[in-house]
Image: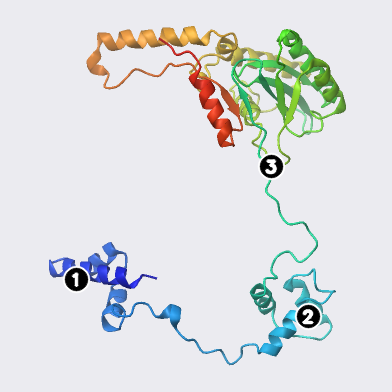
């Protein structure tokens, strides 16, 4: 509804435009009202008293429930046998007893007016879910993400299982294995082999290993191995698919590669050969868009700063040769700083920003 002052202002503007030669219909459309609306305002008291609908006295329908009937609806709905039922169950059960008091919508309306439309059973009140587990990786070997995905076989219903561990900071695949079955012993062996390959034993601060809530990744065998290695486990929230987004994105990249077979893998060796080629391509040949198009291996080894600085010099010299072709600054080749997993909380985002500012900039 349009207030009285807004009505008077619109009517005045439309009248002024119409008097100046504008068509009335177009003037009304520009103001956001219909011609009939303007006519109703002018013929009645719409421009003097405003909209009378909110204060209109509406007669009660002759067929409306009486006070006693409404009280009866409320009494029946709160009987012990109906106290935990919605109107959709109460009304049919009353009909089976040969009783009709009111319709389901009437029951619902009366209960709503008395604040009884919430869940009528003993279920606990809904609670807000806990915030996601947040981790910040300011260097390689600080936060790892891992997961398992299915690789289809040529035989329908048969699968191979690909385990991957991704370094959050560098995006490098630091560990992987393919097996014929999903087993916690495979996951524990992969973590141990990756920890040895990455030299975790020599680090003062052990990495965090973040995964989903799958039974394999939370098995006792895996937890015992993580405890022995000093690696700190971290898990996604239950039934939340994007808490481990970096690993999920990696699997999508893998399965959308042209080399991924549409008909599945012939056997386990074929799946392992494909995984070997993919991991090598991803780590050494792939220029990752989120890390300024350097390879994950280059960032993992700390070579990205020198590479990006050299790119910056190439662009500076190109602009010096043809300054008229550059209307703005050269492309940003500043190294990417800290990477945050699930940056939901403001304090965490602020910490990540401060960590990024501490990174050395390219010349």
| x and y, in percent, of residue 195 in the image | 75, 13
Residue position for label 2: 76
Residue position for label 1: 15
- Count of picture labels: 3
Residue 236 shows in this picture = yes
Mark 2, Cα crowd under 10 Å, few <14 / some 14-19 / many 20+, is: some
| x and y, in percent, of residue 50 in the image | 34, 77
Q: Disc 1 versus disc 2: distance between alpha carbons?
A: 59 Å
Determine whether 52 is above or below 197 in the image: below
Q: Quadrant of residue 25?
A: bottom left
Q: Earlier in the sequence, mark 1 or mark 2?
A: 1
Q: Quadrant of residue 61?
A: bottom right
Q: Is residue 308 left or right of residue 352?
A: left
Q: Secondary structure at mark 3?
A: loop
In the picture, the quarter occupied by the N terminus is bottom left
In the picture, the quarter occupied by the C terminus is top left
Q: Quadrant of residue 73?
A: bottom right
Residue 152 shows in this picture = no
Q: Is 232 or 195 nearer to us in this picture?
A: 232
| x and y, in percent, of residue 213 in the image | 76, 34
**Numbered disc in front, either 2 or 3:** 3
Residue position for label 3: 130
Q: Secondary structure at mark 2?
A: helix
Q: Residue at x 64, y 17 (%)?
A: 278
| x and y, in percent, of residue 88 in the image | 73, 72
Q: Disc 2 versus disc 3: distance between alpha carbons?
A: 39 Å
Determine whether 65 is above or below 212 in the image: below
Q: Residue at x 66, y 76 (%)?
A: 105
Q: Earlier in the sequence, mark 2 or mark 3?
A: 2
Q: Earlier in the sequence, mark 3 or mark 1?
A: 1
């Amino acid at each position: 509804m349009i207030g009285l002052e807004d009505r008077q202002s619109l009517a005045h503007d439309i009248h002024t435009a119409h008097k100046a030669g504008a068509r009335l219909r177009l003037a009304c459309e520009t103001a956001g009202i219909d011609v009939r609306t303007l006519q109703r305002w002018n013929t009645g008291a719409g421009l003097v008293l405003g909209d009378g609908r909110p204060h209109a006295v509406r007669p009660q329908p002759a067929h409306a429930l009486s006070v006693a009937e409404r009280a009866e609806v409320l009494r029946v709905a709160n009987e012990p046998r109906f106290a935990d039922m919605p109107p959709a169950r109460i009304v049919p059960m009353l009909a089976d007893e040969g009783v009709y008091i009111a319709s389901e919508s009437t029951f619902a309306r009366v209960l709503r007016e008395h604040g009884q439309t919430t869940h009528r059973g003993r279920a606990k009140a809904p609670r807000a879910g806990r915030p996601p587990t947040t981790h910040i990786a300011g260097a390689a070997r600080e936060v790892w993400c891992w997961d398992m995905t299915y690789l289809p076989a040529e035989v329908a219903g048969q699968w191979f299982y690909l385990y991957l561990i991704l370094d959050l900071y560098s995006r490098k695949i630091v560990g992987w294995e393919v097996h014929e079955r999903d087993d916690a012993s495979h996951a524990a062996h992969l973590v141990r082999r990756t920890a040895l390959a990455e030299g975790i034993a020599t680090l003062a601060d052990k990495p965090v290993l973040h995964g989903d809530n799958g039974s394999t990744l939370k098995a006792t065998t895996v937890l015992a191995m993580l405890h022995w290695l000093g690696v700190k486990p971290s898990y996604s929230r239950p039934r939340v698919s994007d808490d481990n987004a970096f690993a999920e994105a990696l699997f999508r990249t893998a399965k959308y590669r042209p080399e991924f077979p549409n008909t599945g893998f012939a056997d386990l060796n074929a799946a392992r050969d494909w995984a070997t080629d993919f991991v090598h391509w991803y780590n050494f040949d792939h220029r990752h868009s989120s890390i300024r198009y350097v390879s994950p291996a280059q960032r993992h080894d700390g070579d990205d700063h020198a590479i990006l600085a050299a790119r910056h010099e190439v662009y500076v010299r190109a602009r010096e040769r043809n300054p008229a072709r550059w209307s703005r600054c050269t492309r940003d080749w500043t190294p990417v700083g800290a990477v945050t997993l699930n940056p939901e909380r403001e304090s965490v985002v602020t910490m990540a920003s401060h960590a990024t500012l501490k990174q050395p900039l390219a010349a």
